[in-house]
Image (tube, grey):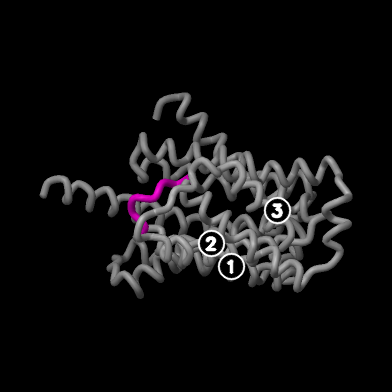
Amino acid sequence: MTLPHLGLALLVNLIWGFSFVAAKVAMEHYSPLLFTSLRFVLVALFLMPYLRFPKGRMRHVMSIALLVGVAHFTFLYMGLNVAGGVAAVAITIQLVAPFSLILAIIFLKETIRWKRILGLILAFVGVMLMGFDPIVFDYLTSASLVAGAALFMAAGVILMRQATGIGAMQMQAWIALISFPILFVFSYAFEDDHLSQLLTLNLRHVAALLFTVVATTIVAHGSWYYLLQKYPVSVLTPYGLLAPLFGVGFGLVLFDEPVTWRFIVGGAVTLAGVFIINLRSAEKLKKNAQVSADA
């Protein structure tokens, strides 16, 4: 990678790592469902120019929006809201990779060999090790919600792999547009004090909300999509693991989260498993693309 693109990859993962902190800060004021609703309202407004109808794909897009926009972010932000910090959340959400692989095996009949099997085992063993950490165990509800969020995202990823011809920003725009009315209804039904949350503006909380919209969704995702057009997935995969490391680092520094050996070992084992899965999947994708090109 060129030095500017390397810097961009690092910046993207720094933003994604800090996004856990920004969301946690924003939910000091906004309830989780309302926060998610507001995020998607703003994303839809910013990405309005990308809202073009995907011919023959609208049902597919709606399914992705329900899984990713509604289910994934609802579970993620509810889990983050009840968590003691952000470090365990940043690691647990990495279960997206092993869950995606399992769903691909079940629904896409994908075959895997020993390297990715090893990655699956390491990823889940690592999360189990963290679960036995007394600090994480105190927030077991949070860990369960975040694991559920990872499963919903994994299902969305499987559908996204089949949604050819739809750009990343176009997909983000549709997810936001479809999700926010549903989330507003859920928020109205299950949460209180909406007017006070909307009318009482605090610069810190509004800035945190805007960060998740502009920096996380638009800048980071847009930049990553740009890099994916320049480099193979296998080149970018190792950098993707920096986001949870940055998230853990921000949690330790900004929230003064305690660290135990179980958390360190469990987090390291989980990320090792995710790294193996992602790298091997990227290599397989590259190999399949070369075979298709040769044919």
| 127 left or right of 161 in image | right
**Residue at 61 percent of width and 45 percent of height:** 45
Report, in whole angstroms, how far the alpha carbon at label 2 lies from the one at label 1: 6 Å
Which residue position is annotated with label 1?
Answer: 71
Q: Earlier in the sequence, mark 1 or mark 3?
A: 3
Question: What is the residue that sits farthest to the bottom in this orientation?
Answer: 106
Q: Is residue 122 visible?
A: no
Spot occupied by residue 97 in the image (x, y as percentages of width and height): 46, 60
The answer to whether 231 appears left or right of 215 in the picture is left
Q: Amino acid at mark 2?
A: Val
Judge whether 244 appears above or below 211 on screen. below
Query: Which residue is disc 3 drawn over?
Result: 38
Question: In the image, residue 281 lies at what x, y percent?
Answer: 34, 55
Residue that label 2 marks: 68
Q: Check if mark 2's residue and mark 3's residue have beta carbons within 8 Å.
A: no
Look at label 3 and name its amino acid: Leu
The mark that comes first in sequence, 2 or 3, is 3
Assign a secondary structure to mark 1: helix
Predominant secondary structure, magenta span: loop
> In the picture, residue 191 is in which quadrant?
bottom right
Mark nearer the viewer, 1 or 3: 3
Magenta segment range? Answer: 163-169
Tag 2 and tag 1, C-beta contact below 8 Å = yes
